[in-house]
Image: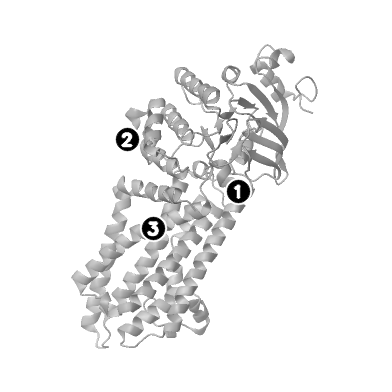
């Protein structure tokens, strides 16, 4: 194998230029409602991309289609070289996710949950991996507690530990810090940034906390009514669109979506 | 199919059983209640009847076999419902887990707990009421295979129904064995059924099992063809139920039902 190519957990060999996630012309229609309309984007290795938009914009629908929980009406999704529609298991072997609305079973302990999902992901050296994650997320003392009795912040840390079990190349995080106190959220953001910078993991991050998005994300995409409106550097976008900060831009886009202008997606 | 994900599903159920006396109790307690209740009923019938029928063998034996079938079906459904109750579908089905691995895990879980229940039932029935399954001899193998197979099929079918109709529909699937029991001829010969019920009975593998059991206990040799037919029918039902489950799963992915499953979704 040449040194510039890496073998993935799914067994595929990707070149460095291959995006970890490639979404092409993705649409999802429910009866008369078009939830997502012809959305296309890539995520590269080591890149953290923020997916922003008001409630009901289609963010979770996109995440669900990438995770194979929802079949798109049209379009294609590739995780590395694997098409999610044709090679679901291989594609998801190198993917993981954490979402504020998808807590782990409350009737299993933290350690049992990690072992259960570790087996599902066929993680090698599972015991050592679990111990390492318990240490990383400061969960050692909670290992034998049932997840259902943990605080929401502790549950979030367990979900994130689960999300890293298989050392994913693509990580989908749907409001991962929503229930954390500022200190815990800061620690988690640092973890996630390290994961992207040093682990080469591509990350899709949704959040309504614009400060957080500006701090963490390399690139953001604004979604409204199922369409991608704008894409760019979160530090430069506000000034390019005449707003003081990302939050102001978010509010403006949510109320009167741009159709033209720099960074606007035709 | 990978073994690790299957082991994960089985291990999860073992964790749940180990951590909760409420889940352990049904494996032992209701088994004992069934045997004691039916044991005394059959012993009483033996004492007052002059028919010459051994009620302990025919009725208690039938109860025991029928209980095995319902336990296997409920074992699969319960393991599936654990994911419904804990709202685990998003975490579970966003993994590389294949449907075949998931269903195999549910089936193995159920077989483990049902076998434990069967051993306890056999021990109680033998020790307390003198029921001997050795009288059935080698016939016991196709009988148990058939009932196990049909229990698996019905368990997978029930899980598919809950997946399709939503969490509240679990109340529709618990009584499925009771709905089938009049056609399965558990306690009476198939010949007593009215003509219009017989085709349904012939389509159900348990009817052949209980006919065969009564033949042996009545001193006759049961014909091999119906028993072979029952085993094959059970296998066919397993294949059909597994196919239906995978179709329902694909429907749930296509329509978004899976992603929003924790909401009530009967439609």
Callout 3–callout 1 Cβ contact below 8 Å: no
Alpha carbon separation for disc pair 1 and 2: 34 Å
Which chain letter goes with mark 1? Answer: B
Q: Residue at x 29, y 54 (%)?
A: B25
Which chain letter goes with mark 2? Answer: A
Say whether residue A7 is left or right of residue B64.
Answer: right
Say whether residue B148 is left or right of residue A72.
Answer: left
Q: Position of residue B176 (x, y in %)?
A: 46, 64
Q: Residue at x 45, y 83 (%)?
A: B225
Q: Position of residue B97 (x, y in %)?
A: 51, 47
Say whether residue B35 is left or right of residue A155.
Answer: left
Q: Does residue A184 appear in the picture of this structure? A: yes
Q: Which mark is residue B264?
A: none
Q: Which mark is residue B253?
A: 1
Callout 1: SS: helix
Discs 3, 2: same chain: no
Callout 2: SS: loop
Q: Position of residue B126 (x, y in %)?
A: 22, 71
Q: Quadrant of the C terminus of chain A?
A: top right
Compare marks 3 and 1 and give the one earlier in the sequence: 3
Q: Quadrant of the N terminus of chain A?
A: top right
| Near-viewer residue (A112 or A226) | A112
Decide: few, some or many residues near mark 2? Use Cα within 10 Å; few <14, some 14-19, many ≥20. Answer: few
Alpha carbon separation for disc pair 3 and 1: 26 Å
Callout 3: SS: helix
Q: Which residue is mark 3?
A: B110
Which chain letter goes with mark 3? Answer: B
Residue B180, quarter of the rendered image? bottom left
Alpha carbon separation for disc pair 3 and 2: 26 Å
A57 vs B87: above or below: above
Most distant residue in the front direction = A2
Q: Which residue is mark 2?
A: A144
């Amino acid at each position: 194998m040449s040194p510039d190519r890496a073998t993935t957990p799914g067994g595929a060999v990707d070149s460095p230029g291959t995006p970890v996630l490639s979404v092409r012309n993705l649409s999802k229609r429910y009866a008369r409602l078009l939830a997502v309309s012809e959305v296309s984007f890539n995520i590269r290795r080591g890149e953290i991309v923020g997916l922003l938009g008001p409630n009901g914009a289609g963010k979770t629908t996109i995440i669900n289609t990438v995770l194979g929980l929802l079949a798109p009406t049209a379009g294609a999704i590739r995780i590395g070289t694997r098409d999610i529609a044709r090679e679901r298991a291989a594609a998801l072997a190198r993917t993981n996710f954490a979402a504020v609305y998808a807590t782990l079973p409350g009737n299993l302990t933290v350690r049992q949950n990690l072992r259960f999902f570790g087996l599902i992901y066929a993680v090698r050296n599972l015991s050592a991996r679990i111990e390492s994650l318990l240490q990383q997320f400061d969960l050692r003392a909670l290992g034998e507690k049932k997840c259902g009795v943990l605080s929401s912040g502790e549950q979030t840390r367990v979900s994130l530990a689960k999300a890293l079990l298989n050392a994913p190349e693509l990580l989908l995080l749907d409001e991962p810090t929503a229930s954390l106190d500022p200190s815990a959220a800061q620690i988690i953001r640092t973890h996630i940034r390290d994961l992207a910078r040093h682990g080469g993991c591509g990350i899709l991050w949704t959040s309504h906390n614009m400060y957080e998005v500006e701090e963490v994300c390399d690139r953001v995409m604004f979604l409204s009514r199922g369409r991608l409106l704008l894409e760019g550097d979160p530090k430069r976008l506000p000034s390019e669109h005449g707003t003081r900060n990302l939050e102001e831009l978010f509010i403006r886009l949510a109320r009167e979506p741009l159709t033209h202008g720099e960074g606007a997606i035709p | 199919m990978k073994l690790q994900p299957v082991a994960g599903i089985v291990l999860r159920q073992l964790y749940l059983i180990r951590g909760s006396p409420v889940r352990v109790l049904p494996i032992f307690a209701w088994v004992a209640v069934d045997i004691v209740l039916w044991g005394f009923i059959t012993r009483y019938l033996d004492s007052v009847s002059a028919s010459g029928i051994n009620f302990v063998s025919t009725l208690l034996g039938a109860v025991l076999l029928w209980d095995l079938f319902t336990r296997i079906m409920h074992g699969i459904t319960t393991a599936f419902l654990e994911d419904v109750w804990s709202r685990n579908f998003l975490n579970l089905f966003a993994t590389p887990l294949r449907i075949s691995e998931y269903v195999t895990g549910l089936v193995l879980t159920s077989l483990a707990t049902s076998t434990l229940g069967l051993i306890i039932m056999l021990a109680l029935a033998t020790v307390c009421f003198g029921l001997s399954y050795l009288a059935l001899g080698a016939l016991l193998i196709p009988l148990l295979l058939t009932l196990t197979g049909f229990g698996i099929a019905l368990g997978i079918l029930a899980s598919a129904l809950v997946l399709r109709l939503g969490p509240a529909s679990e109340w529709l699937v618990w009584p499925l064995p009771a709905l089938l029991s009049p056609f399965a001829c558990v306690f009476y010969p198939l010949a007593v059924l009215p003509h219009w019920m017989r085709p349904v009975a012939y389509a159900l593998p348990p009817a052949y099992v209980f006919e065969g059991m009564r033949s042996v206990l009545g001193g006759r040799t049961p014909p091999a063809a119906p028993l072979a037919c029952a085993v094959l029918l059970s296998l066919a039902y397993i294949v059909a139920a597994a196919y239906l489950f995978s179709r329902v799963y694909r429907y749930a992915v296509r329509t978004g039902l899976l992603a929003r499953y924790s909401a009530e979704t009967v439609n």
